[in-house]
Amino acid sequence: MTARSRNAQETRAELLAAARARFAADGFERTTLRAVAADVGIDPALVIRYFGNKQELFAAAAEFTLDLPDLGDVEPDRLAEALLPRFFAVWEDDGQFLALLRAAMTSPAAADKMREVFADQVGPKLATATPDRPRQRAGLLGAFIVGLATARYALGNPAVAEMDHAELTTWITPVVRQILTGPYPETP
């Protein structure tokens, strides 16, 4: 191992970057604290010192902000157009989301983190665009968006993964509009 400066903030940032890369590539279950430490060139005990355990490291590494726009004044036909660029940016430019998405399939801690993101960042923004039943509508849109991200990025389904942003937006705009603002289906 090479000699390292003792800058705690730099070490913490390097650990988070290494953890994000590991979780994205290997998933939650196969990522080890020892591997993350080796990627940074430090003793594994330092990972525990900074983060406590793998779940806490994952929670710190999986932090991301969707920064969704205010949807209160967006026309129903433009909701997908307002939302999707931000989702695309997070999906494609932010390794934390893909790591979180993959890990959420097998890790309760990751699934909790995904639910937290939707509850804290997505649900409140979507609620401003809905005429009624905001919790159900936000939940359904969340399920649709996570399914879309899974098909496009985790599974690499060619029919979805090969579409450019404009084509994908065209296809899913009516779905987003229906889920968020369409009439509530009456039950028999």
Image (cartoon, helix red, strand yellow):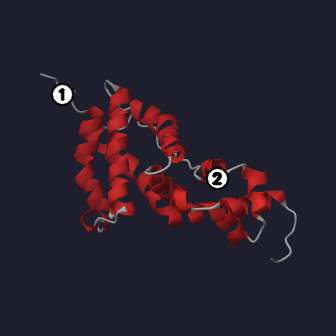
Relative to 28, is 112 above or below? Answer: above
On-image quarter of the C terminus: top left
The residue lying at 68 percent from left, 50 percent from top is 53
What residue is pinned by disc 1?
185
Q: Which secondary structure lies at badge 1?
A: loop
Q: Position of residue 66 (x, y in %)?
A: 51, 47
Badge 1, how many Cα within 10 Å: few under 14, some, many 20+?
Answer: few
* Real-space Cα separation, disc 1 to disc 2, in angstroms: 44 Å
Q: In the image, residue 8 lies at what x, y percent?
A: 82, 58
Residue 122 image offset from top left, x and y in percent: 45, 39
Residue 85 position by quadrant: bottom left
Q: Is residue 170 left or right of residue 143?
A: left
Instruction: Please state if 162 lies on the left or on the right of 100 as rendered.
Output: left
Nearer the observer: mark 1 or 2; the answer is 2
Say what secondary structure mark 2 lies in. helix
Three-letter code, disc 1? Pro
**Which one is in front, 73 or 84?**
84
Dot 2 crowding, Cα within 10 Å, few <14, some 14–19, many 20+ = some
Q: Which residue type does callout 2 highlight?
A: Lys
Q: Could you tell me if residue 94 is visible in this image?
A: no
Q: On the image, which quarter does residue 6 sit in?
A: bottom right
Q: Quadrant location of the N terminus?
A: bottom right
Residue visible at 55% across and 47% down in the picture: 65
Q: Position of residue 174 (x, y in %)?
A: 22, 45
Residue at 40%, 30% in the rendered image = 127
Which numbered disc covers residue 54? 2
**Most foreground residue, 136 or 67:** 136
- At 34% from the left and 66% from the top, the residue drawn is 156
